Every structure is written in structure tokens, then in C-alpha cells.
Image (cartoon, rainbow, N blue to C red):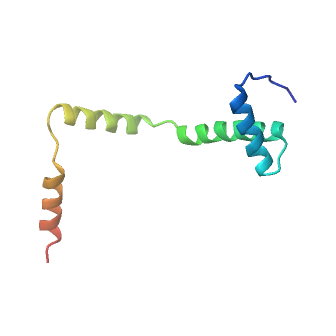
Amino acid sequence: METIAVPLQSDAIDRIKRAAAEIGMPVEEFIASAAEQVVTDDEAQLGTPLSEAQLASIRRGVEDVAAGRVYSHEEVFDELKAHFKR
């Protein structure tokens, strides 16, 4: 196990100590757990890299927008209403 020293403002230290105490966890364990959760959340948000097909599809969409090949919200809903009208 490795130890890392991190300088913190005293108000941050107080808040961390209070939060750790509220859940009955040692401060060191609380900080380590919080840091690990941040890394895990970040990795989860990054997800899997996009495939070349997905990137190509995004590029086509951006090109469509740049060329004005778009529909307004109203146009889309008007078409949907007409299509599903019974």
C-alpha cells in the first residue's frame, strides 16, 4: 500500500472529518473510498471508445447540420402526428 500526502484547506479537512464521522468511517478510509469512487465514476462515464462506424455516423450528422439538412421540432412532431393519426 502506498501513502499520498495531500494538502487541504482547514475547512475542507473539517468537512471531510464530519462526513467520515457521520458514517462511522476512519478519515483515511473515507478519503481513499471517495477517491476510488471518483476514478470509477470517471471511467464509467468515459465508457467504451466509439467505433469507426459510429464516428462516421456522427460526422455525417455534423455535415447535415452544416449543410442545413435539418428539421425543426415542430416539423418532426407534425409529421409524427400525421403518420399516427387514426
Q: Position of residue 63 (x, y in %)?
A: 23, 32
Q: Quadrant of residue 86?
A: bottom left
Q: Position of residue 66 (x, y in %)?
A: 19, 31
Image quadrant holding the N terminus, namely top right
Q: Residue furthest right?
A: 1
In the image, 46 versus 27, the foreground residue is 27
How many numbered circles does the render carry? 0
Q: Is residue 21 left or right of residue 64?
A: right
In the image, 66 versus 60, the foreground residue is 66
Residue 47 in sight from this viewpoint: no
In the image, 39 versus 62, the foreground residue is 39
Q: Position of residue 73 (x, y in %)?
A: 19, 52
Picture residue at 13% right of the left edge, 60% below the top: 79
Residue 35 in sight from this viewpoint: yes
Q: Is residue 60 left or right of residue 32?
A: left
Picture residue at 74% right of the left edge, 21% below the top: 7
